[in-house]
Amino acid sequence: MTDAASSPPQKPMRGATRVLSDILAGLGDSRRGAEEDQTAKLGDVLDRLDDRAFGFLLLLLALPCCIPFVWGIPQIVALPMLALAGQMAMGRHHPWLPRTLHERPFSVPAFQKVVTRSARYVGWIERFATPRLRPVTSHLATRIVGALLLIPTASILLPVPSTNTIPGIGVAIASLGLIERDGILVILGLLIGFIWVGLLLFFGLEATQLIKDWLTARF
């Protein structure tokens, strides 16, 4: 009989951000050399993901958007995020990226730092993630979720500083929900994204009206 003490310890469950960090670390190790020269492609990340690839890829791309006062990177990653959300809406079971996005290179060390830094904004939510409200993460429901994610993701494309953080956090939370099969997190992430878009539209219309009134009064 094998002694229980001699049995190998079970590996603890790890959060989604830790899994992404390990994937990036693995990509960096496979490209030995100067740290600044270590690059990978989005397709390399996709090849290392499991059946929850949509959630993991959306989370990886949403994390840079969670960092406040960052402009440029969120507008770049929003394009593949839109492509992924659109594919979810169309009912695909696994992500497909156009060749230009599949082959798009990125700096492994730089993205590793982004994941580590932005994890503080969403990482704590992972402690509360647990499978619940399973129908929300079913294949049929994820088609609806993908269609809804198009709206907050599209708002990240706006070339206005500091407008990407809140929708980025919303998409990241919804992505965590998809990964952990947690319907409550999916709904929470969508609510955050939609509330932000609603506020953006409201204040945008208000600002437009004020400018219109000002121009009318002057001319």
Image (tube, helix red, strand yellow):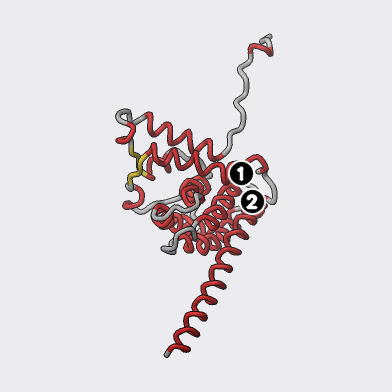
Identify the mark at residue 70; answer none if there is no mark: none
- Residue at image coords 43%, 32%: 25
Amino acid type of disc 1?
Answer: Glu
User: Mark 2 = which residue?
Assistant: 185
Toward the viewer: 70 or 145? Answer: 70
Horizontal and vertical percent for residue 22?
48, 33
Left or right of residue 171, residue 41 in this image = left
Left or right of residue 162, residue 141 in this image = right
- Look at the numbered discs 1 and 2 and tell me whether their residues touch, using CB distance below 8 Å: yes
- Residue at image coords 67%, 44%: 131
Horizontal and vertical percent for residue 157?
43, 61
SS under mark 1: helix
The residue lying furthest to the front in this view is 218
Answer few, some or many: residues within 10 Å of disc 2's Cα (few below 14, many 20 plus, some between 14 and 19): many
Amino acid type of disc 2?
Answer: Leu
Q: Is residue 167 above or below residue 116?
A: below
Q: Is residue 21 above or below residue 7?
A: below
- What distance separates the C-alpha of mark 1 from that of mark 2? 9 Å
Question: Toward which corner of the image does residue 83 lie, by quadrant?
Answer: bottom left
- Residue at image coords 48%, 63%: 155
Query: In terms of sequence position, does the residue under pointer 1 or pointer 2 come before the other?
Result: 1
Quarter of the picture holding the N terminus: top right
- Of badges 1 and 2, nearer the viewer stands 2
User: Mark 1 = which residue?
Assistant: 180
Horizontal and vertical percent for residue 182?
65, 48
Toward the viewer: 24 or 166? Answer: 166
SS under mark 2: helix
Left or right of residue 113, residue 186 in this image = right
Left or right of residue 84, residue 189 in this image = right
